[in-house]
Image (cartoon, rainbow, N blue to C red):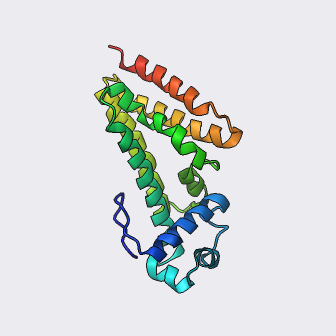
Amino acid sequence: MSGTAHHGETKLTPAARRILDTAAELFYARGIHAVGVDTIAAESGVTKRTLYDRFGSKDGLLVIYLEDRDRRWRARIDAHLTEETDPLRRLLTPFDVLPEWLPDSSRGCSFINAFAELPEPDHPGRQVIVAEKTWLRDFFRDHAAAAGAAAPEQLAIQLLSLHEGAIISYSITGEQDAPAAVRAAAQQLAERATKN
């Protein structure tokens, strides 16, 4: 594999970047199992050998795709966090990022979609998915504690459920107000949970 620093910037050759970008579009639009390496290689303008040289296997490519998507998601959250000092607003940052993220997510959450296609608990792609969702839950828990929540773990589970629900609602119904409505609900919930 050509550079796979987990959650850091992945170092890829131009051909590998092209393969990854093409695979990302195809996996998201068509599904993981519906797309073969022949299609990815052809649409990337490379040979299958190049794909295998860069990623080792389709599963290796899938893992890098999921890690890359996770890295970009966390970078968006981090960019918003640097602008915010209020603990309650920091807690709600993932909701603030949704309106800019969702237009590129018309088929829902790429992690949930991939999870549905990877039933094997030891699949390396599934491990990336679980790590991403665990990270988001832990983000909510840690920021809930910093904001003074009496039960940060419970609030984290509630906020994670609202967050994931907003993505699903937006992708299925096309409800443009879903991110704002869910953000308002999350704020009310967080304010009640952090009152002393």
- Across the whole image, how many numbered discs are drawn on residues? 0
Q: Is residue 163 left or right of residue 79?
A: right
Q: Is residue 108 visible?
A: yes
Q: Position of residue 136 (x, y in %)?
A: 42, 43
Query: Is residue 127 among what the camera can see?
Result: no
Along the viewing direction, whichever of 133 and 12 lies nearer the viewer: 12
Is residue 115 shown above or below 2?
A: above
Q: Quadrant of the C terminus?
A: top left
Residue found at the far right of this picture: 173
Q: Position of residue 192 (x, y in %)?
A: 42, 17
Q: Is residue 85 left or right of residue 106?
A: left
Residue drawn at (54%, 63%) of the image? 120
* Relative vertical location of residue 35 with respect to residue 182 in this rendering, above or below: below
Q: Whole-percent x and y of residue 150? A: 33, 22
Q: Pick the residue in front: 115 or 48.
A: 48
Q: Is residue 194 left or right of residue 180?
A: left
Q: Residue at 46% across / 23% down in the picture?
A: 187
The answer to whether residue 43 is above or below residue 131 is below
The part of the image, by quadrant, that contains residue 99 is: top right
Residue 133's spot in the image, x, y percent?
45, 47
Q: Quadrant of residue 148?
A: top left
Question: Which residue is nearer to you in this view: 181 or 84?
Answer: 84
Quarter of the figure that contains the N terminus: bottom left
